[in-house]
Image: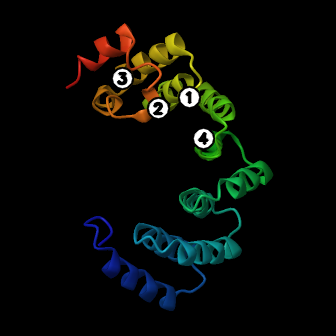
Amino acid sequence: YSEIENYNEAKKCFEHAIKLDPEEPIFLSSKAEILFELKENEKAIDVTNKALKLDSDYTDALFLKCDILIEMNRSEEVIKILDDLEYDEDIVTDVKELESIAYHELGNDIKGLECVNEALKFESDNGSFWYNKACYLSLLGRQEEANDALLIATSIEPENINEIENDEDFENIKNTERFQKLLNQSV
C-alpha cells in the first residue's frame, strides 16, 4: 500500500502489525513514516519516539524524526539531536545531509555548506551533495564555485539539469553565461 501511495490502508496494516508485535520498532517507525506522508506530523513524532524508546540505536527512526522536525520548522531540535549523536563512518553522510538541510532552514548556509563538504569527503560521487553544494555557493554569492559544483552535479546526475531553471537557490547565478549554457543542455 505504501508503494502505491494508499497511505490510509498502509496505516491500517502497520497498526495491525503493531498489535501483533508491539515491541517491534520497525513497525512503529513504518507507521510513523506513513503518518508523515499523511501530514500527521505530531502523531508521527510520537510514534517515532516510541520506536526510539524500544531501540535507541535505530537510526532509520532517528533520521525520520529529524525529517519530520525539519518539516515542522523545528530545525534547532534536529541540530541538537545530531550534535548529541555518537555515530561512525557508515552513517556520516546521512547525518551531514540532515544537518545541512537543518542549517539551511535556519538560514545558516555557511554551516550547510560545511556539512555538505563533509559528506562529499565520504561520497564524492553523490550528485545530490554536489547539487546542494551548488545551491549553497549560489546563495552565498560565490558564482564561479557554484557553477563548478553545478557542472559536477549535472555530470553525475544529468536529470538535475531539469531542476535548475526553477530552483530559487540559483537566482544569484541564473544570468551567468555558464549557467545559461548548462540550462540550454536540458533534456
Q: Which mark is residue 104?
A: 4
Q: Which of labels 3 and 2 is toward the front?
A: 2
Identify residue for label 1: 136
Q: Which of labels 4 and 3 is toward the front?
A: 4
Amino acid type assigned to the residue bearing label 4 in the image: His
Residue 39: give x, y in percent of width and height. Answer: 44, 70
Quadrant of the image containing the C terminus: top left
Kindly state the secondary structure of the residue where label 1 is placed.
Answer: helix
**Residue found at x 31% / y 29%:** 165
Q: Which mark is residue 154?
A: 3
Question: Answer yes or no: do the residues labelled 2 and 1 have beta carbons within 8 Å?
Answer: yes
Q: Which mark is residue 169?
A: 2
Kindly state the secondary structure of the residue where label 2 is placed.
Answer: helix
Amino acid type assigned to the residue bearing label 3 in the image: Thr
- Earlier in the chain: of badge 4 and badge 3, it is 4
- Earlier in the chain: of badge 3 and badge 2, it is 3
178, above or below 29, in the image: above
Residue 161: give x, y in percent of width and height. Answer: 30, 26
- Is the image coloured rainbow, by chain, by secondary structure, or in one colour? rainbow
* Front-most of residues 20 and 65: 65
- Earlier in the chain: of badge 3 and badge 1, it is 1
Local crowd size for mark 1, using a 10 Å CA cut-off: few (<14), some (14–19), many (≥20): many
Q: Alpha carbon of mark 2 to alpha carbon of mark 1: how far?
A: 8 Å
Q: Alpha carbon of mark 3 to alpha carbon of mark 2: how far?
A: 16 Å
Residue 141, located in which quarter of the rendered image?
top right
Q: Which of labels 3 and 1 is toward the front?
A: 1
**Residue found at x 23% / y 17%:** 185
